[in-house]
Structure formats: structure tokens, C-alpha cells
Image (spheres, grey):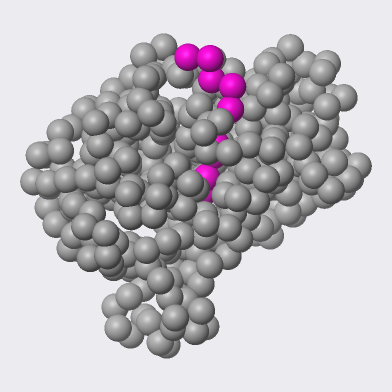
Amino acid sequence: MSIRGKAYIVGAFEHPRREIPDRSLTQIHADVALGALADAGLSLGDVDAYFCDSGAGFGPLSMAEYLGLRCSIVDSTETGGSSYLAHVGHAAAAIAAGKCQVALVTLAGKPRSSFEGFRGFQGEATPESSFEGMWGINGAVTNYALAATRHMHEFGTTSEQLATIKVAASLHAEHNPNAFLPHAVTVEEVLESPMVSDPLHRMDCCVVTDGGGAVIVASPSVARDLARPMVKVLGHGETVKHTNNGRVDLTYTGAVWSGPRAFDEAGLGPADVDYASIYDSFTITVLETLEDLGFCDKGKGGEFVMDGALVAPHGRLPFNTDGGGLCNNHPGNRGGMTKIIEAVRQLRGEAHPAVQVPNCRIALAHGTGGSIATRMGSVTLLLGQEDA
């Protein structure tokens, strides 16, 4: 069963703060839930499905009680940074199957002011820890540095090319009053920033922030009665890529599978995309994902991102116009939610005028969870305006 046109994103809200020491994780979930519902013109009483992968107690069970929800569906799918794109796809499928009408999806995290809500690489409790952790490969940066090194070796990718991705994100963050790093940087400044794990510099890495966000996914019958612009869910693809018992190729991500699935369901191709929200935990994450989604040939990502290709509003493929995880917001190690929210803004014509893509009809949002050097969950969403 296809979900194309069977569900709509009717509300979206991003928490404006990047340090929130005075709110609990549960309270942040509630803040963003109420914000998204207000944006949609709905109330908690309208919600009959709830999705989250973090929260106090039993996750969605505890949060449903806290919010006073009466749910027919709950979902706590955990695929790291791609979790919330998976939740939107799952919510759309549940709506298409008649299981619910209004799905609330919330994210909250506090890794900056505390470790509440932060879940990264889990350490000794995982099945791979005895093989990897003891050798120092359990850190996020080291894993991504391995992938970057291999991509450079195979295809001649350069640190300067990776740096242009950070530069594009920073040019967009200048126009976001809530961005954690709201100032533009140059390629030279990226390369002069401290080396964290060769070849990745500090500015190749995402920010660490508190925060959160929420979206409301609704059936067509509910969406038609609301005043806000509707964003149609056109396609959804998800997959898991892992080490394949040691036969791992570091030069590609799970997007090689999730992307075609989403495009096929939407009846679209890369050339149809006007705007892309690409998960940017590190600059190498963006570069490999662009290749794997078909925006350029494998190994040509470094060339593709040059000459302002990613810069809004008139680049070849404007991306992450809120500043992305590299400059704006990456709450709780779960930046996928913010990718959806900015795609919604672009399709509604509500992005900052300086970065709003003209006549933006089709947007792609992609999330990467885990690590591109080991195991990851990759999820791709195609979203469009009502007439798309």
C-alpha cells in the first residue's frame, strides 16, 4: 500500500532555545507538542496517535499519560538521528490503514545542559562493544573520520570540499535568529579550526544543543478542515546498513536503498527536488548522502558541492536553510526532526526570505542514525505542496 497523498503534515514547531537548563525532558516534549498543535489549529484532544523515541519512563507510554492523550497507536522506533523521519513514515502508513487520524510526533533532548535525553553510542551493553569499543571505535567522530578518510582515498575528495558544506550551512544560519552558531565562516576558517579526528576539523562537526521539535501528521479529511497550508507526504523509504560481518564499505550510506524507495513511492526523481534537508552530523555525512540519493555520481560529491551549489536560494540544490545540525540545532543527538521542520517551512513559503527557495514544490528530508562507518538507520522522506 502506498502512502502517497494519504497523509499530510499540518503542524510543525521547533523549540526556540538551544540551552534549556530550567526545563525537564518531559516538559520540553510538552512544549513542542503544544507548539505544533497550535500551529495546526488542533488540541491534545484531537490526537489519537503518538510517536517519540525519547522521554521519561516508558517513552511514549509515559508521555501519553503526561499529555493526557487517548491513543490507538504509539511508536517508539529508535534508529538514532533518522528516528523522526521514520516516525512520520510510520504515522502516514497508520493513517492510510485507518488506524488513526491525527499523529503527534515529538523530540526533546538536553545534551548541552545535562546528559538527560542524550543517547549516542551505547557502549558495553551493545553486541558489538566487545569487538569495537576496546579499540577506541565507539566515538562518533572517529567513526565518521574513518569514512571521510576512505572517501578521500577512493575518490580524491578534499578537506576544502568538505569545508564548503559547513560554509553553506553557516551562510544560512546567519538568517536564523535561534541558530546556535549564527555567523558565516570561510573555507579557510573551517580548515584552521582544531583537528578533532583526522581529517575532520571541529567545524566539520555538528553542534551539541538542547531543544526539540514536533510535527502533526493528519489524514486528508482532517487536513482539509484546517487553515494552515498542508504538506503532502509523497514517499518514504527506510533501511538499515551495517558492517555485514566485517565486509563494510565506508564510501556509501543506507541512503542508496532508502532514497530509491522514497522516490519510487513518490513517483519522482532527484531532478524533481527543489530543496533538500540532509542530515549533517558531520560534513562527510552530507557529501556521501548527496551521492547516495542520486544528486550526483558516486565519488563526485566533492565536485558537486563546490561553487555555491548548496547555498539558498539559487544554488543547484539548496540545503539546510535553517543552518542544519552544523550550525543551528542538533538536540539529543536526534537532528532528523529539524530536517522535517525546515522542509515544511520551505514548502509553506515560511523560511527566512533570504533563503526561501522560489516556487518550492518538492522537498526531500533525509536522516542518518548511528554511524556511517559501522551501522546506521537511513530514512528518506519526499514531501510536497498540495498540488504536487
- Prevalent SS, magenta region: strand
Between 360 and 24, the residue placed more toward the observer is: 360
Residue at the location (69% across, 38% down)?
Answer: 267
Between 301 and 356, the residue placed more toward the observer is: 301
Whole-percent x, y for residue 227 in the image: 74, 12
Between 326 and 191, the residue placed more toward the observer is: 191
The answer to whether residue 366 of the structure is visible from this angle is: yes
The answer to whether residue 102 of the structure is visible from this angle is: no
Specify the farthest residue to the front.
Answer: 297
Residue at the location (48% across, 69% down)?
Answer: 375
Q: Report whether 302 appears left or right of 348.
A: left
Image: magenta residue range:
358-367
* Residue 366 within the segment the image draws in magenta: yes
Specify the farthest residue to the bottom.
Answer: 130
Whole-percent x, y for residue 203 in the image: 22, 45
Q: Report whether 265 appears left or right of 102.
A: left
Specify the farthest residue to the right.
Answer: 98
Whole-percent x, y for residue 192 in the image: 8, 46
* Residue 42 within the segment the image draws in magenta: no
Q: Is residue 309 above or below residue 67?
A: above
Whole-percent x, y for residue 107 in the image: 57, 44
Residue at the location (40% across, 50% down)?
Answer: 297
User: Which quadrant, please, contains the C terminus?
Assistant: top right
